[in-house]
Image (tube, rainbow, N blue to C red):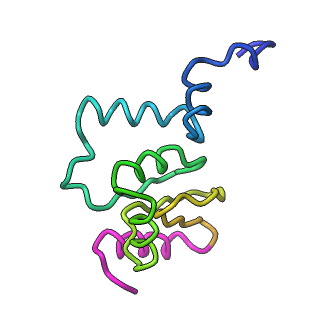
Amino acid sequence: MGKFSKDKRDIYYRKAKECGYRARSAFKLIQIDDEYKIFNENVKRVVDLCAAPGSWSQVLSTKLYKSIEEANEMLEKGHPKVVSVDLQEMAPIPGKLIFLFIISIKIIILNIIFFLLNINY
């Protein structure tokens, strides 16, 4: 970005910070949804791979849940709508289950499959 990168951050970086998003990429997902309506009423569950720092998961939570209360309730019942997977730890987001690649890749894949099929394990 150059030697004065702090001064030259683009508008989306600043807007992300103002809106509470973890990264400017949140606006790209919002733009995709605005144009293609990918998060309609038919979308029941989403897996966010390589999710850190979590800005897409933040957007997904706002698109798939009506409120923070609903998000937390679904998570407590074991039926989250959003699962985020990454090597890095992330701060929690209401209603979002986070898997880390600490255990084994097979266990993570099985957990994602169970999540998508809505199987309690």
* Above or below, 120 relative to 107: below
Q: Quadrant of residue 5?
A: top right
* Dominant secondary structure, magenta: helix
- Find residue 84 and report its horizontal and vertical position in percent: 49, 59
Q: 2 or 35, which lies in front?
A: 35
Q: Name which quarter of the figure residue 31 lies in.
A: top left
Asked if 113 appears above or below 65 in the picture, the reply is below
Image quadrant in which the N terminus is located: top right
Q: Examine the structure image and report whether residue 114 is included in the region drawn in magenta.
A: yes
Q: Say which residue appears at 53% left-offset and 64% top-offset.
A: 98
- The x, y position of residue 46, in whole percent, is 35, 57
Q: Residue furthest right?
A: 3
Q: Residue at x 44, y 69 (%)?
A: 109
Split into 4 quadrants, where in the image is the C terminus?
bottom left
**Where's residue 72, x and y in %?**
46, 68
Q: Residue furthest left?
A: 42
**Residue found at x 53% / y 51%:** 51
Identity of the residue drawn at 66% across and 18% down? 9
**Region in magenta:** 103-121
Report the side of 89 relative to 65 (left or right).
right
Q: Is residue 104 magenta?
A: yes
Taking 19 as reference, is 118 left or right?
Answer: left
Estimate the x, y position of residue 13 in percent, counting from the top left: 60, 26
Where residue 64 sits, quadrant-wise, is: bottom left
- For residue 34, above or below residue 63: above
> How many numbered marks have been drawn onto this rendered protein structure?
0
